[in-house]
Amino acid sequence: MRSHSHLLLQSDRTSQIATSFKPVAASIVKIEFKNREIFMAREGETHRKIFESQFGKPVRAQAWNAIALQMKEAQMPFTVENLKFVAKCKRIANYHRVKSPVLKNVITAAAQLGEEAYGFQILQCVFRLKPGLTRDKFYRAFRTSGIPFKQSFQFKIPELGEVLYKIFVER
């Protein structure tokens, strides 16, 4: 049987490793750990509660089950970043379902483009993944997001998740 002093020493070590432990939202905690920020669910919080806190309103069980199924089919792990992204996608296309082929296309495009890419590379990648796309829809996705597009501009791909989702979603 372990003594309570052993548990106290273990928690002291944990507090020495993690430099800060701050609540970010109602159900998310930000931990700074070895110069990295890790976002985790608070103990007892479900993925659905995290999604609802990012989406801004409660979600029915049926709707949540459909979203969770699409995330599983797209092979997206239930991390806080992914839940934030899917909540943002749901806000963008509120009357459309979040579909796994769309999420897979966004993930594939982001993986092919890497961290940064020029506009012409984004254009080529998107038209390779979705050949029937019109140029108007491509440019409209950037314009409605407030991001100017030129083929010579260099873009950070993690910041273009919303734009990529708008491009691949059927409207």
Image (cartoon, rainbow, N blue to C red):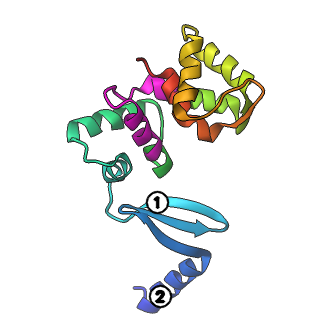
Whichever of callouts 2 and 1 sits on the residue coming sooner in the sequence is 2
Name the one closer to the observer, 132 or 138. 138
- For residue 5, side relative to residue 49 (left or right): right
Q: Quadrant of the C terminus?
A: top left
Q: Where residue 56 sits in the image (x, y, percent)? A: 33, 49
- Verify CB contact (< 8 Å) between mark 2 and mark 1: no
Name the one closer to the observer, 4 or 13. 13
Q: To which residue does mark 2 refer?
A: 8
Q: To which residue does mark 1 refer?
A: 40
Amino acid beneath label 2: Leu
Q: Secondary structure at mark 2?
A: helix
- For residue 35, side relative to residue 74 (left or right): right
Q: Where residue 85 sits in the image (x, y, percent)? A: 47, 41
Q: Is residue 131 above or below residue 160?
A: above
Q: Where residue 93 sits in the image (x, y, percent)? A: 38, 29
- Dot 1, crowdedness within 10 Å: few (<14), some or many (≥20)? some
Q: Secondary structure at mark 1?
A: strand
Decide whether the magenta segment is chiefly helix, strand or loop.
helix
Based on the displayed image, in which of its 4 quarters is residue 27 positioned? bottom left
Which portion, as a residue range, is magenta?
Answer: 84-105
Residue at the image point whose x is 50% and y is 82% from the top? 11
**Is residue 87 a member of the stretch shown in magenta?**
yes
Residue at the image point whose x is 35% and y is 46% from the top? 55
Residue at the image point whose x is 54% and y is 22% from the top? 140
Q: Is residue 58 above or below residue 70?
A: below
**Is residue 42 a member of the stretch shown in magenta?**
no
- For residue 141, side relative to residue 112 (left or right): left
* Total numbered labels placed on residues in the image: 2
- Dot 2, crowdedness within 10 Å: few (<14), some or many (≥20)? few
Amino acid beneath label 1: Met
